[in-house]
Image: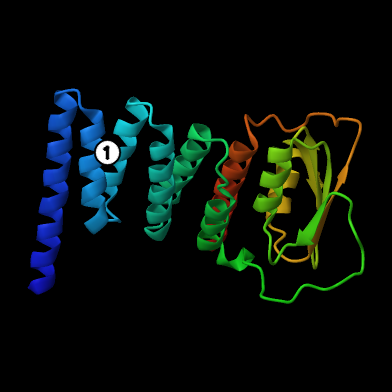
């Protein structure tokens, strides 16, 4: 009974805050509306209605930083609720609102939640004694999404080689944009799907003076990753039927 009363009080607080915000919007005071919603979020941090309304008002009033923050917060909540499609949408929106945002952590969280079988094993990195001129790392510590983000931000052209326990793959970049991939005998988007499944091993990037032929025509690296995660999820569901 106590829990039920507490939940109803929180619902009432959320509804009141949203109604207040709508009133401020009616009188053309978006700053006050946003402040009212932020105040309500302090005691209701996981309220989707509050965050969604704050996100909408922030976008309309050109407060893109606030909108991006709310998108990231919403993505985290949607992942916890296993609403992965909406989480995808909010991550992509956050990236579009602020290209500086690194959403690799969110993408990795979705992949692990959807496909726990692809989670990397907690094994220590092996030292090979090799040095790399541009970028290299251990996939158990740094995901392929993080590597892609770094290469995209640096606008590098070259080849990312991934070496896993049982798979290898290559991703080709032109000025930070993924243009091709190959793994397990498949190329293009099918090859990139195989790449995403490599979660153990190492990666290294080699710069190239020449650009590569464009096989993958995705609007952006983020779109490609999100579409690939969806396909992996659909494949997992079909396999479970």
Which quarter of the rendered picture does the N terminus lie within? bottom left
Badge 1 element: helix
Q: Position of residue 226 (x, y in %)?
A: 57, 43
Q: Left or right? Give the position of 158 relative to 152.
A: right
Residue positioned 43% across, 37% down in the render: 65
Q: How is the image coloured?
A: rainbow
Q: What residue is shown at x 69% (from left), y 29% (from top)?
A: 217
Compared to 191, does 219 lie above or below?
above
Q: Quadrant of residue 46?
A: bottom left
Q: Residues within 10 Å of mark 1 (few under 14, many from 20)?
A: some
- Vertical order, 188 against 164 (above or below): above
Name the residue tied to disc 1: 53
Q: Residue at x 38, y 44 (%)?
A: 70
Res 85 visible: yes
Residue 163 appears in the picture as rendered: no
Image location (x, y in percent) of residue 19: 12, 38
Q: Position of residue 77 (x, y in %)?
A: 37, 55
Q: Residue at x 9, y 73 (%)?
A: 2
Q: Is residue 105 left or right of residue 23?
A: right
**x and y percent of residue 43 in the render?**
22, 58
Residue nearest the viewer, comparing 157 with 111: 157
Q: Residue furthest toward the bottom? A: 123
């Amino acid at each position: 009974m106590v829990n039920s009363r507490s939940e109803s009080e929180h619902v009432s607080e959320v509804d009141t805050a949203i109604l207040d915000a709508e009133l401020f919007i009616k009188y053309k005071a978006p700053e006050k509306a946003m402040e009212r919603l932020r105040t309500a979020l302090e005691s209701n941090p996981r309220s989707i209605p509050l965050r969604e309304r704050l996100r909408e008002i922030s976008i309309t009033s050109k407060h893109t930083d606030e909108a991006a923050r709310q998108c990231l917060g919403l993505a985290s909540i949607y992942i916890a609720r296993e609403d992965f499609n909406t989480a995808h949408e909010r991550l992509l929106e956050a990236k579009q609102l602020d290209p500086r945002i690194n959403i690799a952590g969110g993408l990795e969280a979705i992949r692990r939640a959807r496909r726990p079988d692809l989670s990397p094993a907690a094994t220590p990195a092996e030292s090979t004694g090799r040095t790399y001129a541009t970028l290299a790392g251990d996939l158990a510590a740094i995901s392929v999404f993080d590597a892609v983000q770094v290469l995209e931000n640096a606008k590098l052209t070259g080849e990312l080689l991934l070496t896993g326990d049982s798979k290898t793959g290559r991703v080709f970049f032109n000025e930070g944009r993924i243009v091709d991939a190959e793994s397990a005998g498949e190329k293009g988007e099918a090859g990139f799907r195989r790449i995403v499944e490599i979660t153990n091993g190492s990666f290294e990037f080699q710069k190239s003076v020449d650009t590569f032929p464009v096989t993958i025509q995705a609007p952006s690296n983020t779109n490609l990753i999100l579409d690939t995660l969806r396909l992996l999820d659909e494949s997992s569901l079909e396999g479970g039927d």
